[in-house]
């Protein structure tokens, strides 16, 4: 797969793909096929020759897999519009590749933020964008092409430095302490990374920091159900560290196969970047904890992973479906993705299967 940058002379190709996208997914755009099919050649030319925009195609073996555009707006913002992936190419990471290309272009342009709008009913698209690092901006508006549908604005920082650079630490701090505080401040970003699981206590989704805290409490309460003896303190360290890389890599929804295509590569790069903020001894220690969780090579890591997969089942149960409905998965899908619970706790895997089976009986999962 490669990216084609469209420019003068590509008007016919751009028009063809854009109209194909509008016909395929009319609810995803702020315009309509009827409106744009009537555009004059000058309109298509102006879109491709502006120095305030970029228009991209994802191409493989001569076939167009997807497209997007981005417009430079006031305040150092690049507005992504017209994101579309051909039906036959969905699930292959095309949209993420396009977004990453736009992000690189935005950095080159000296911009600080990406923004886009996503229609409220389009949960898979929202999940994809949030896995790419976007978060809600708190703004809503009617979809221009269908005012009965609301859309939300999402934003993502690009080219920004560490959080600590926004308000630099005082000169003269001990160098080791300064590195540690920079890391502590940076991991505040975890509170802004949204997961797909709905909270039981509020009408919103949980963030990564809340998830990690919940797992820590589950370890304390449920440790007696581990199949092998575990060091509870060590297991707590594993669950507190396990999602830190999502600060840079974003959350990858369990049931979104497209988002998981390059998950391992993204998370390895994020681990290298994040833990390097710490003094060498602590960087090595936290990286070893993260690696241990990922590889599940110890009883503690296997139980920690069991907690990680069991907790969302409880939240989906309380939401009477939750992400099971969002991603339209089957009970067999859920069992397959959650079977790893049994590697750490046979008792909790039995309980998980009971919840899944009863959820299926109640119509909360297919």
Image: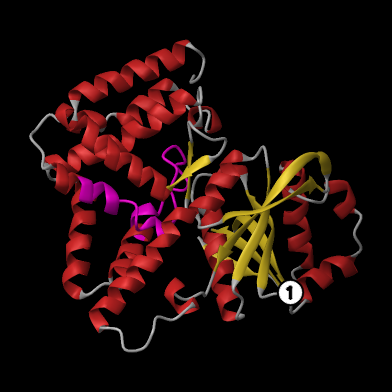
User: Helix or strand or loop: what does disc 1 sit on?
Assistant: loop
| Coloring basis for residues | secondary structure
Residue 177, how many percent across, how many down? 26, 77
- Residue 253 inside the magenta-drawn segment: yes
- Residue 222 inside the magenta-drawn segment: no
Residue 323, how many percent across, how many down? 49, 32
Over which residues does the magenta segment extend? Answer: 236-265
Is residue 50 or residue 16 the one in the foreground?
Answer: 50
Q: Is residue 221 visible?
A: yes
Q: Determine the image quadrant of residue 229.
A: top left
- Disc 1: CA contacts within 10 A as few (<14), some (14-19) or many (>=20): few
**Picture residue at 53% right of the left edge, 48% below the top:** 128
Q: How many marks?
A: 1
**Picture residue at 49% right of the left edge, 33% below the top:** 201
Is residue 301 or residue 236 the one in the foreground?
Answer: 236
**Picture residue at 44% right of the left edge, 81% below the top:** 168
Q: Is residue 52 left or right of residue 91?
A: right
Q: Is residue 255 left or right of residue 58?
A: left
**Picture residue at 50% right of the left edge, 44% below the top:** 91
Residue 336, how many percent across, how many down? 33, 28
Dot 1 corresponds to which residue? 74
Residue 235, how many percent across, how many down? 18, 45
Residue 21 higher or lower than 325, as above or below: below
Q: Is residue 248 visible?
A: no
Residue 326 higher or lower than 77, as above or below: above
Is residue 224 or residue 364 the one in the foreground?
Answer: 224
């Amino acid at each position: 797969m490669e990216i084609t940058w469209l420019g003068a002379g590509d008007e016919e190709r751009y028009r063809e793909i854009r109209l194909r996208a509008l016909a395929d997914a009319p609810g995803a755009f702020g315009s309509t096929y009827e409106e744009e099919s009537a555009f004059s050649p000058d309109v298509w030319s102006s879109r491709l020759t502006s120095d305030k925009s970029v228009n991209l195609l994802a191409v493989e073996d001569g076939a167009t897999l997807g497209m997007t555009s981005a417009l430079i707006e006031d305040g150092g913002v690049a507005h992504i519009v017209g994101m579309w992936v051909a039906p036959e190419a969905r699930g292959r990471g095309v949209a993420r590749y396009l977004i990453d290309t736009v992000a690189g272009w935005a950095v080159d342009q000296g911009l600080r933020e990406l923004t886009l709008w996503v229609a409220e009913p389009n949960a898979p698209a929202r999940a994809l964008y949030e896995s790419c690092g976007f978060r809600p901006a708190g703004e809503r508006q009617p979809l221009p092409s269908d005012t009965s549908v609301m859309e939300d604005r999402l934003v993502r920082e690009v080219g920004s430095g560490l959080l600590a650079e926004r308000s630099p630490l005082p000169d003269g701090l001990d160098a080791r302490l300064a590195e540690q505080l920079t890391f502590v401040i940076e991991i505040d970003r975890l509170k802004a990374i949204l997961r797909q699981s709905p909270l039981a206590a509020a009408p919103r989704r949980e963030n990564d920091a809340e998830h990690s805290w919940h797992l820590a409490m589950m370890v304390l309460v449920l440790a007696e159900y581990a199949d092998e003896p575990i060091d509870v303190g060590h297991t707590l360290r594993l669950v507190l560290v396990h999602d830190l890389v999502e600060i840079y890599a974003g959350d990858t929804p369990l049931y979104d196969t497209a988002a998981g295509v390059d998950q391992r590569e993204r998370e390895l790069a994020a681990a290298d970047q994040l833990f390097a903020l710490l003094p060498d001894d602590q960087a090595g220690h936290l990286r070893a904890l993260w690696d241990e969780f990922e590889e599940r090579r110890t009883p503690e890591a296997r139980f920690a992973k069991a907690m990680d997969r069991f907790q969302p089942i409880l939240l989906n149960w309380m939401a009477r479906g939750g992400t099971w409905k969002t991603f339209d998965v089957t009970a067999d899908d859920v069992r397959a993705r959650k079977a790893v619970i049994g590697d750490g706790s046979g008792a909790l895997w039995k309980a998980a299967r009971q919840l899944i089976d009863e959820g299926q009986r109640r119509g909360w999962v297919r």
